[in-house]
């Protein structure tokens, strides 16, 4: 840890966790490196 890129990735993940109420956060890794972070938020509809 402590690498600038790793700190950036962790900050993005923390931000996504704070922003969503329901959903998933996916981290895509290729050749041992993070290449993409996805946030999929779901909205619950109450009838």
Image: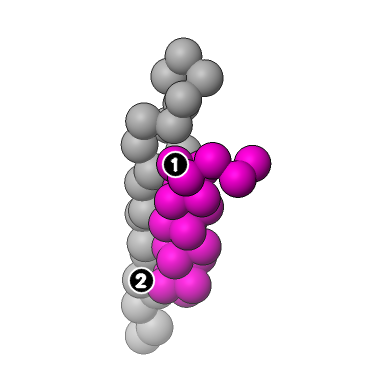
Q: Dot 1 corresponds to which residue?
A: 5
Q: CA distance from mark 1 to mark 2?
A: 31 Å
- The quadrant in which residue 44 appears is bottom left
In the image, the segment drawn in magenta is: 1-23
| Residue at 36% across, 54% down | 40
- What number is the disc on residue 43? 2
Instruction: Locate residue 43 relative to residue 1 in the image: left or right.
Output: left
Q: Is 14 part of what is drawn in magenta?
A: yes
In this orientation, which residue lies closer to the viewer: 24 or 38?
38
Is residue 6 within the magenta segment?
yes
First along the sequence among labels 1 and 2: 1
Tally the numbered discs.
2
- The residue located at (36%, 46%) in the rendering is 38
Nearer the camera: disc 1 or disc 2: 1
Which quadrant of the rendered structure holds the N terminus? top right
Q: Give the residue at x 60% y 45%.
A: 2
Mark 1 element type? helix
Residue sticking out furthest to the top: 31
């Amino acid at each position: 840890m402590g690498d600038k890129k790793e700190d950036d990735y962790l900050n993005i993940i923390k931000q996504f966790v704070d922003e969503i109420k329901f959903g998933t956060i996916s981290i895509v890794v290729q050749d041992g490196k993070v290449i993409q972070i996805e946030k999929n938020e779901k909205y619950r509809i109450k009838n």
